[in-house]
Amino acid sequence: MFNQTTADTSSFAHFTQAVQELNFAAYRATGLPSLGVVKELIYGQRRANVIPIGVLHYQYNLLDTLATYDGRLSPQDRRAVLYDVPGRTQSPYLSRTTLVPSVLAIEVPVGTSTFSLPNSLQFDNTGNVVTRIDIDFGDGLVTRPLGGTFTASLPTTGVRYIHFVTYLSDGSQTSSYSAVLVTDATAAGGVVLNGQTPGKNPTGVPMSSVTTIDTRPCFDAVALNNVLPFRDYLGVTRAGKGDVSYYYSDCAKQTDVVKPVILLDGIDFIKPGTGLDTRDGRGVYSQLGYNNNGERNLGLDLRQAGFDILVLNFPGVGGADFIERNAFVLVALIQKTNRTLRATALATGKPLEKLVVIGPSMSGLVSRYALTYMEKQYNGASNPATYRQPDWDHNTRLWVSFDSPQLGANIPLGAQRYIRFYSQVLEVASATANLEQFPSHCT
């Protein structure tokens, strides 16, 4: 009953729930895509760093509660089943139309962002089509391009209510709102800090002299190349993605790795409404806090002891991708790092520095697979391309795995049934999304 008598407020959760409700309530196909298809359209936009705005303009029917009293429907067999009455002169259903424009993200970053009104996320079965949308992001109502992109600024954090005025081809217009949380990603170790963009640490201050925890790396989100493709159990062959945040012992003096500790991100499901994972390299580093309120940081301690921290993040869907695919990403990082270490040892005459690899949670399995795979390739005499080749010597002196299901994982049946109930019985869209993240053997 959205936007029937008042200017109501939608959101990402409300919009996706509306799509699911209309699909579940339909007798036959309505032309409205399934919730899964709609979410993939949303995530495709988010992966392109665009925040989409959807428009749901749909006509639907609901039961007239007076229909059983005036003989248009007849309850029979004491089963609370309603039957149509032959010869009735009036429909037992009421017709309603809902118009729901919404920003399709739970959170957006503070500052200027790119938004879109893609045709693929405008759904209409009324024939009374949307001809114009004016949107107020705090800068007044401005006509935004249907089917196009535009930029808008949200300069302050907190919950913001975006005002929409939607114009239809019959000359009518509707006012409504969309709620969105504006956040400062830097507060949680995001991509930008104090106005600085990714790249070399602009302060040039040796980290040993820093007295407060600074999550800025020396080099941020460096993409890995030459990753081996993996054919997964769905028959899809592709290479995984990884980016590395480099936290040298001394950002001011170092230009490359000297004494590396590779720290992997653990399992990281897609953040609802974004199609992106919930942490980047800075986010992982910021979670190394300890000592009561986290005023100490293990990463900073290691750097002050002369170690370099390399945080390997699996961006996008990679945070919950196949273990083998992410393992091949780690293999690429190990090979790249070891080439640097070998070159340094050759140039200085010093002993070859060895790696430390740390894998929490799922990345304990990822790192175990990667190291084992490299050992088999290095020691496998049947393959001359890898046998005793330097690139396949992982050169790792210490592997640390913690909170990792090395003997398998068990999700309590109670938790599975709880989410399944809310997903399939109460038809809660967010519960369905959580259910989809369970491995098939757990459901």
Image (spheres, grey):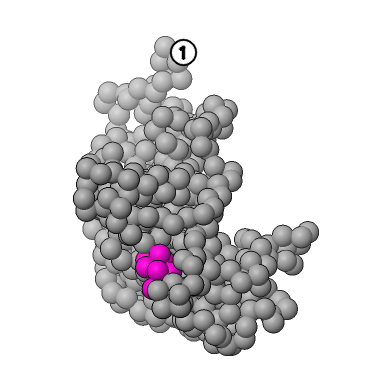
| Position of residue 431 measured from the top left corner of the image (x, y, whole percent) | 49, 41
Q: Is residue 308 visible?
A: yes
Q: Is the magenta stretch mostly helix, strand or loop?
A: helix
Q: Quadrant of residue 175?
A: bottom left
Mark 1, residue position: 78
Q: Is residue 111 left or right of residue 133?
A: right
Look at 56% across and 29% down and name the residue there. Answer: 412
- The one nearer the camera, 402 or 272, is 402
Q: In this view, does 75 lie above or below 298?
A: above
Q: In the image, 82: left or right of 257?
A: left
Inspect the magenta stretch and tell me whether residue 321 lies in it: no
x and y percent of residue 156 in the render? 59, 78
Q: Is residue 82 above or below residue 144?
A: above
Q: In which quarter of the image is the C terminus?
A: top left
Residue 93 is situated, as x and y percent measured from the top left of the image, at 36, 38
What amino acid does circle 1 point to?
A: Arg
The boundaries of the magenta stretch are 336-343
Residue at the extreme front: 349
Would residue 31 be visible to someone looking at this image? no
- Residue occupying image coordinates x 50% and y 46%: 364
Q: Quadrant of residue 368?
A: top left
In terms of depth relative to the viewer, which is nearer, 318 or 33? Answer: 318
Judging depth in this view, the residue of 25 and 87 nearest the camera is 25
Q: Position of residue 115 (x, y in %)?
A: 38, 73
Mark 1 element type: loop
**Residue 210 as seen in the image, left or right of residue 323:** right
